[in-house]
Amino acid sequence: MQVNLLKSKMKLYGDTNATLAAAIGISPQRLSAKINETGGAEFTQGEIDAIRKRYQLSISEVGEIFFAA
């Protein structure tokens, strides 16, 4: 996962961990764990889709953010 790309999109859209977490239906703590991949936490497909829609991401941007090594 490319954390910096996600954080740059969050900043561009004026989101904090709290606002993005609320938008995708999880707690800010859980979002932080998923962003930092703490304890094996990963975004679900539904969460990724919600983020894609919120930030109007292209399919290639989704791949770059969530699936790049």
Image (cartoon, rainbow, N blue to C red):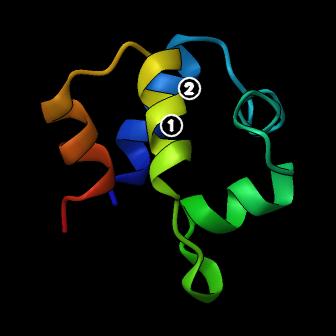
Q: Residue at x 46, y 19 (%)?
A: 53
Proximity of marks 2 and 1: CB atoms separated by less than 8 Å: yes
Residue 23, quarter of the rendered image: top right
Q: From the viewer's perspective, is 68 left or right of 36?
A: left
Dot 1 crowding, Cα within 10 Å, few <14, some 14–19, many 20+: some
Q: Which mark is residue 10?
A: 2
Looking at the rendered image, the quarter that the N terminus falls into is bottom left
Total marks placed: 2
Residue 59, quarter of the rendered image: top left
Residue 47, quarter of the rendered image: top right
How far apart, in angstroms, are the residues tagged by discs 2 and 1?
5 Å
Q: From the viewer's perspective, is 36 left or right of 14?
A: left
Residue 25 location (% of width, % of height)? 79, 40
Residue bearing mark 1: 7
Q: Residue furthest bottom?
A: 39
Identify the secondary structure beneath mark 2: helix
Q: Amino acid at mark 2?
A: Met
Q: From the viewer's perspective, is 17 left or right of 36?
A: right
